[in-house]
Image (tube, rainbow, N blue to C red):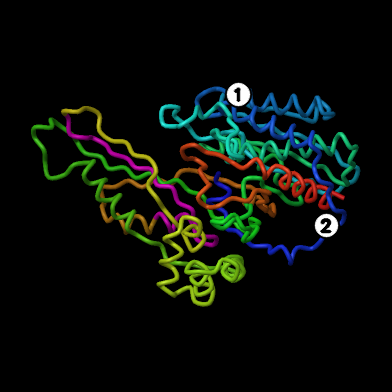
Amino acid sequence: MRGARYLLTAILAGAALAPPAQAAPAPTAAQHQRTLDIWKKMIAIPTVHGRGQMAVMANYIAGLLTQGGFAAEDVEVEGSGDDVSLAARFRGTGKGKPILLSGHMDVVEARPSDWTRDPFTPIEEDGFVYGRGSLDMKFGDAVLVSTLLQLKAEGFKPSRDIMLLLSGDEETAMATTARLADQYGANAELLLNADGGGGLLDKSGKPVAFYVQGGEKTYADIEISITNPGGHSSRPGATNAIADLAQAIDRIAAYRFPAQTNAITTAFFKATGKQTGGAIGAAMLAFADNPADEAAVATLRADPEYVGIVGTTCVPTMLAGGHALNALPQKATVSVNCRIFPGVSVESVRDTLVKVIGNPRATITVLGHLYFRAKGVPSYGVLGMFLKPEDDFSHGLNERAPIASIDPALRLMRTLIVDLAR
């Protein structure tokens, strides 16, 4: 779920929301059940990189759309293996630029031995659906598909085309995201991303705020490698690739990039701080007034919910090294995932890491990245789901999402599509 974690969020307090041009009707029981069924079917398809299931997922969605009234030529599944994407066109009556609806079909790996339940057998329990991808992001996919099916069944005629774009490798190479951006990004009015935004509940379950993705942090994977001639483990020398890399990892983990703000994050902290209260709320307000307030910065950075909003973050995520138990390592590598504050270049972050590591033997490589915003498409994250921070298990064990979010999510997505595509 790169959306919620690498996208800055702007707050829309309920009282400040302008009423829609026409209030969306509450979803029927049948639509609720259809969405739940689609959601669970999607979870049951293990769309993990390397399992060859991306086309199964894409063809399942394509079948739903064509059965629901989409012309076959308006639903395209492209690619093979994991390099699969889906594009579906809800044809409009006018000549306005299309509205793009964005999501991804793939999920991160989940080992059944680590989970309490089988990760690819969706289970309803205590008001949640459990399963890999239940939150990230097959809930959003199901809401998008169900909303378009409902509008098609009602005979809705948008004034512009609506494009559903689902990538197949968002969690890995993002080649399909790049392809979709190239194909559809040049001529789009805006993009609604169902993998960002959403509502926040406090520990008692009371709604605090609803967030709309208003800006985008740059995603970058940086690979750091150290090589050595190696040799027999009985003859260790002064340097060791694994030991040297361990020192580099420690330095990266201890480093904090400077705190930063922009108009979106300042507005976010001012509005959210008033509603949140307590130490976190006070830190939000203090940081909004003075980004150099070290105590406020420390408080926000200690909370996983807000650490990504106060500046760039870089964290080690994968590690490899050595080739034999009785040999000195010839190479050790760590992958560092960076979420870079808007306006900060990837190159400057790489240069900072070079200084932080301080080892001339380290090779530091930036891997590729590309997004719709790079094509000039205004993009907003909108997901009608409210969660407590402690219920966010995306990418983690026993991932789950609340069934109660189905109806409000359907209503929000329908309202946005109908109002924007009139």
Instruction: Find numbered disc 2 in the image and state the secondary structure of the residue it sits on.
Output: loop
Query: Tag on residue 20?
Result: 2
Q: x%, y% of residue 9?
A: 60, 59
Q: CA distance from mark 1 to mark 2?
A: 41 Å
Seen from the viewer's position, the closer of residues 260 and 397 is: 397
Q: Is residue 378 left or right of residue 216?
A: right
In the rendered image, which quarter is residue 53 located in?
top right
Is residue 366 magenta-colored? no
Q: Vertical placement of 218 versus 120: above or below?
A: below
The residue stretch that appears in magenta: 327-350
Under mark 1, the amino acid is Ser
Q: Vertical placement of 119 versus 181: above or below?
A: above
Seen from the viewer's position, the closer of residues 326 and 297 is: 297
Q: x%, y% of residue 314?
A: 41, 53
In the rendered image, which quarter is residue 112 located in?
top left
CB under 8 Å between discs 1 and 2:
no
The residue wearing badge 1 is 80
Query: Going 75% across and 49% down the picture, which residue do you hit?
Result: 412
Q: x%, y% of residue 145?
A: 73, 36
Query: Going 55% across and 44% down the picture, which residue do you hit?
Result: 1
Is residue 333 magenta-colored? yes
